[in-house]
Amino acid sequence: MTEKNKPSESLSSGNAQKGNQSSLRLSTLTQAQLKTLIVQAKVQCKGGELPTYIPLLAKADPSWIAVQVQRIQGEKIAVGDIGCSFPLMSVIKPFVLLFLLEKLGSEAVFYRVGREASDQPFNSLAQLQADRGKPRNPMINSGAIALAGRLPGKDGASCCETLRQWLNQRSHSQLVLDEAMLQSVRSLPNERNHAIANLLAASGYLDHPEIALDTYNHVCCLSGTVRDLASLGMLLVQGSNMISPQHRCTVNDILITCGLYQASSRFAVEVGLPTKSGVSGAMVSVVPSQGAIACYSPALDEMGNSLAGLFIVQQLAQGLELSGLG
Ligand code: GLN
């Protein structure tokens, strides 16, 4: 374990002990501890890149960090640049999967997409070619584009609106479509995503590649704050009677092995929380039976995961012994 990855003293000293009594260790976290963690993240997570293939994402301030923790027991805590609104990008993928599991059922969904981990980048065409056109999982672009093609509606805008309303109603979040971000996504050709959609269509996993891609671009531009993201995350935490427990578990299981692209297996071992990241710097983690952690910090590592987001969740998971696997 490197110095950087050691759990912060301020977390590991008192909370885990309290946690052994209550077994709801996220509930022991205080606002002051979360503030300290943000200060540490600012020191530890220097460097990092902003994505340039979506020009508006490159305009974010890499020093922004916001975190919201929502618990089943205990109040919400939010610290940092919590007024920042950001597009969810790939963080929408587990919620597209959840929606379709609820609407179509597991068999119809997994006819179109696998649930195996991939060690390739999120936009890999080679992975899809190697798998003869069947997307490996719903958390990489091929799988998410295939599933976007199953959202009900006549075009990208209406399919996205159906999902937006469903999510806002069930999670009490206030997601909005960021039209400027959508324009920015469209302003540069994304040849990789086009090639993925065309291969999916050629292999029979997609009926209307142009609509599916447009829907995918729309849903990636659903935007909100860490407050909205934490509320969304709560849909994946036990206790929501809005979602079938079986579908919730399916999404969490897939997140453990696929949520952070090539970093998924390392994170599963070190942290053990279902987590999804996006190129905007958004990240959401599920703490089963306890709550959700939403982070936003736009500086990314080379795999496209938020540097500060990874650091903060890792510190919380280790300091508060959040992983149910230990
Ligand atoms: N819209 C982005 C893309 O397709 C989302 C990717 C991501 O967040 N990893 O490239």
Image (tube, rainbow, N blue to C red):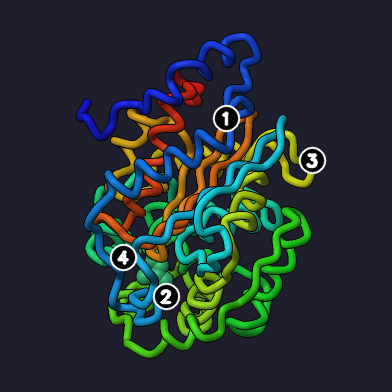
x%, y% of residue 312? 41, 41
CA gap, disc 3 and disc 1: 25 Å
The disc placed on residue 123 is 4
The image quadrant where one finds the N terminus is: top left
- Do callouts 2 and 4 mark residues in contact (Cβ within 8 Å)? no
CA gap, disc 4 and disc 1: 36 Å
Report whether 143 appears left or right of 225.
left
Q: Amino acid at mark 1?
A: Leu
x%, y% of residue 296? 46, 56
The disc placed on residue 29 is 1
Q: Work out whether mark 3 precedes mark 1 in sequence or the reverse, and give the earlier one.
A: 1
Q: Work out whether mark 2 precedes mark 3 in sequence or the reverse, and give the earlier one.
A: 2
Look at the numbered disc 2 and give the secondary structure of its residue: helix
Report whether 32 appears left or right of 261.
right
The disc placed on residue 220 is none
Label 4 near ligand 1 (CB < 8 Å): yes
CA gap, disc 2 and disc 3: 36 Å
> Disc 2 or disc 4, which is closer to the eye?
4
> Disc 4 or disc 1, which is closer to the eye?
1
Mark 1 surroundings: few (<14), some (14-19) or many (≥20) residues within 10 A: many
The residue identified by callout 3 is 241
306 or 66: nearer the eye?
Answer: 66
Q: Amino acid at mark 4?
A: Asn
Look at the numbered disc 1 and give the secondary structure of its residue: loop
